[in-house]
Amino acid sequence: MYRAGKKEIDAIAKVIRSGKLFRYHDQSECGRFEKRYADYLGARYVHQTASGTHALTAALIGVGVGPGDEVAVPAHTYMATAIAVLACGAIPIIVDIDESVTINPEALEDAIGPQTRAVIPVHMWGLVCDMRAIMRIARKHKLLVIEDACQCVGGAYRGRKVGTIGDAGAYSFNYFKNMTCGEGGAVVTRNRKTSQRARCAIDSCGFYWTGRKHDEQPFASNGARASEIEGAMMNAQLDRIDSFTRPMRKQKARVTKAAAKAGLCIAPAHSPDDECGMMNVFQLPDAKAAETFAGRVGGVIAGRTGRHTFTEWDQVLSKRGAHHPALDPYKLPANRRCRRTYPKSLCRTSLDILARTVMVANHPDRKATQVTELIRKITDAAEEVLA
């Protein structure tokens, strides 16, 4: 969370005083946020959810992913990306990243098999994927594209907001994200049928009231709708989002220029003027140099960020895809043609990149003098580790 204060408190207090905490009523805060966020994104449909994980799940259900399908996911993303695939009954296929710390388009194309139906490019750490290459591959192989923009709220790729480029997108609004209501998320799409199915996945009871009037009939789902308190806080946060991303992009540009002069290798950026600017990302010569550099500058090694790297996805690697064996995607007869094993040699290239990648965070409230001090630390550390 970057900033929250009186505006958020007043918005939440107004909802509590109204006594209308359930989202379905006239002048709903959730409904207002969905419309405003759709306008902000340049999207047609936005549906608020209780979490980013459920937003991903609803997006996958919305586009029709299910048993018999493989879905390509990057080797570095929060494990919710892969778990959402399993929640739909499909099988996640883990694909290498490249030095941009996002999915490698060449590795993606190499990983496509007969059962591969979709790909989830993840705009990780506020960095954006190479969407031009990914969309080209998707068109060539007739893949669905579901963008995981959970860590890139407010970011864009070449002028288009992330999450709106593929067939559907998902966002997270939990405590650690650019916009937050503590927990929450949203799914976005331009397709009416996808929107209807996603709505039903989010709240099958709510969709039942109106869904029978449309071509998409209601189906049972374990819903996760948002409350009016979340909607109220998100309306306040939406007013702030550009004031978060603009200064971080400027900070990153300044740090990047100084770091490059100091001889540091900067991670490639696919759309530096449009990304969130949350992280300065450096590639060191090896893991030892990365550890020293991170310690000197107060950075974090990308490969040591917990459940963000596939080697820490216990439920996936152990193939425990559901609470009951009869529902486990790894055991479903419909998935017998899918690739369901994860060899120990998997994605070694990703692990090498992550072990020598150091991330140093930016912050929208950081003063110019503090940026100067950060640059001094980075250039001093570079002189030490690159000597």
Image (cartoon, grey):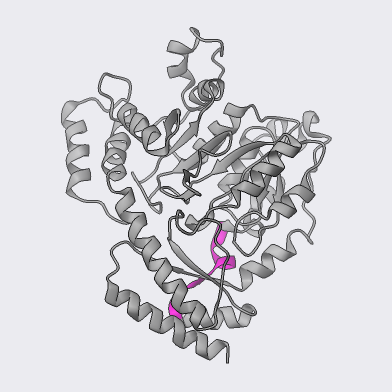
Q: Is residue 370 left or right of residue 10?
A: right
Q: Position of residue 76 (x, y in %)?
A: 61, 57
Q: Position of residue 94 (x, y in %)?
A: 70, 50
Quarter holding residue 231: top left
Q: What number of labels is visible?
A: 0
Q: Is residue 264 left or right of residue 42?
A: right
Q: Which span of residues is magenta-colored? A: 297-307
Q: Nearer the viewer, residue 22 or 248?
A: 248
The reply to whether residue 320 is in sight is: no
Q: Nearer the viewer, residue 250 or 92?
A: 250
Residue drawn at (54%, 38%) of the image: 56
Viewport quadrant of the N terminus: bottom left
Q: Is residue 59 left or right of residue 324?
A: left
Residue drawn at (28%, 38%) of the image: 235
Q: Is residue 196 left or right of residue 251?
A: right
Residue drawn at (43%, 34%) of the image: 49
The reply to whether residue 236 is in sight is: yes
Q: Is residue 351 above or below residue 211?
A: below
Residue drawn at (81%, 41%) of the image: 113
Q: Is residue 212 magenta?
A: no
Quarter holding residue 2: bottom left
Q: Position of residue 191 (x, y in %)?
A: 54, 25
Viewport quadrant of the C terminus: bottom right
Q: Is residue 374 above or below residue 75?
A: below
